[in-house]
Amino acid sequence: MRISLSLLAVCMFLNIQAQDKKKPNIVFFLVDDFGWSDLGCYGSEYYDTPNIDKLAKEGMVFTDAYMMPTCSPSRVSLMTGKYPPRTGVYTVDWYAGTPKKMQKVKGIKSKRFIAEDEVTIAEVLKEAGYTNGHFGKWHLGDQPETSPEGQGFDVNIGGCKSGSPKSFFSPYGIGNIAPQKEGVYLTDVLTDGACNFITENKDKPFFLYFPFYQVHVPLHAKKEWVEKYKGKKAHGQQNVPAYGAMVSYMDYSVGRVLDQLEEHGLTDNTIIIFTSDNGGQIVATSNSPLRGQKGTLTEGGIRVPLIVKWPNIVKPGTIDKTPVTVVDYYPTLAEMTGTSISENRMIDGESFIPLLKQEGQLKRDAIYWHLTSYNGNGRSNSLLWQYPGGAIRKGDWKLIENFENDALELYNLKNDIGETKNLRDQYPQKTKELLKDLKLWQESTNAPIPTEANPEFEESSLDWIVNANKARNIKETERLTAIK
């Protein structure tokens, strides 16, 4: 019996739909300036985060997940799977204001946005049949080729070149978002968009990327949520009600998205990833027991929370202590979705699916950081000051290199998570080993290193940093003094 061409076409279409249905959906939450210690499941006794804590019980918690020190390089590396030397994005443009008199060496300028010819993970997934939605902070450009729409996203709400809103209550002062009634909360608009996206695409595979503008400053929260934190017992330096309210409202928004998945019966076929773009800011929270904050190469600047829920694959309530880093998401998401990556495409990351499945370890033995200029604008926030430098983590060991004067810091993170004891002199061979590995990586990636002395440098210009931190009794004083 002959089958008509039209019937055959219908059968093929239904078969393709059935195959697509088997592909898992991806929901990727990226919180802005959210510290490693800012969740209940990571030890906080101040912040209320019931939805994310529940997610941790349902998935795998990574104790040693990393990003870059600031948001732009983290976001470019996430999208491309490449380390900063390959993208040219090392820091955010805000730090370009570091006065010349505060620069001991001439910093090398960072690119501001993603390159037009980069092939993002969104574009790779789109080629594989995914519908992609972006809701929140992009910060990687707003031209046709550098916007979310130009880099693989079908829907974009709030994604533009802006790094933060002027206000979390309308008007926001950011682009790519429809005008709202005065006073409407930005996070509600983004969450509504994300939930609508799920509803509209429930019958096909989707990649929902939700990079919150929260909990970045300004610390604007709904009054009733701030009231919940007033009078609440502090947990160390976690004691700012407005920040606590922003954290809890972010958690509430995560819960709304998860509920939307449940409503449409998508929970069992959706992978959830939750993380942050860099460490928290000390003016708003505490990264303790980690040292430092956003912008620094110390653990407080680069170590972030990471939770992955993958139904029927990841064993609920598991913990992994293997170092994973931002460039790993590209190959991991591709493998999760059965999407191939061209062999000609250069990526630095490694899929950490063996860790998720608890079936093996990663092949690489080290991860890296590279900063070509100063993180700190010299006009505000003396707590944030990072000289140009590089870093490597290999096993339990971490080495930080100062490009200003070639000074080295060596730490054993297993024994000293707070990086309080520089072991450089006690372990000269280990220091030499890690420095050699770091130099080889710098050479292999053509990483530019600022070495030219700056004739405009004034040593006394750094006094305000040291004095301001002394006044706050900050333990960073000794390290900050050393930069002089």
Image (cartoon, grey):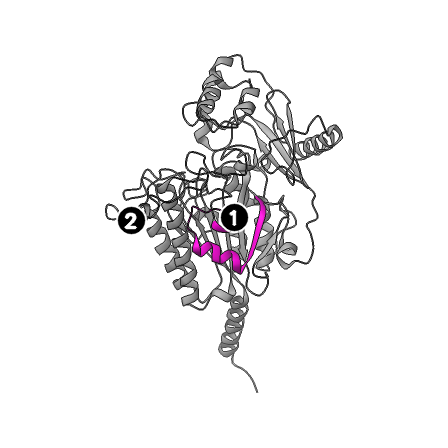
Measured as percent of width and height from the top left, residue 347 is found at 62, 45
Residue at 50%, 73% in the rendered image:
14
429 or 198: which is nearer to us? 429
22 or 183: which is nearer to us? 183
Measured as percent of width and height from the top left, residue 169 is found at 29, 44
The numbered dot on residue 105 is none
Q: For the N terminus, give its image quadrant.
A: bottom right
Residue 468, picture quadrant? top left
Disc 2/disc 1 C-alpha distance (Å): 25 Å
Q: Residues within 10 Å of mark 1 (few under 14, many from 20)?
A: some
Measured as percent of width and height from the top left, residue 355 is found at 64, 54
Residue 118, picture quadrant? top right
Measured as percent of width and height from the top left, residue 343 is found at 66, 50
The extreme right residue here reads 429
Residue at 70%, 43% in the rendered image:
365
29 or 63: which is nearer to us? 63
For badge 2, the amino acid type reads Glu
On screen, 389 above or below 336?
above
Per the image, the residue denoted by label 1 is 42
For badge 1, the amino acid type reads Tyr
Q: Are marks 2 and 1 in contact (CB under 8 Å)?
A: no
Q: Residue 255 in magenta? A: no
37 lies left or right of 398: left
Disc on the earlier residue, 2 or 1? 1
Residue 143, picture quadrant? top left
Per the image, the residue denoted by label 2 is 224
- Find the magenta span and give its range: 40-65
Q: Is mark 1 on a helix, strand or loop?
A: helix
Q: What element carries label 2?
A: helix
On screen, 160 above or below 385?
below
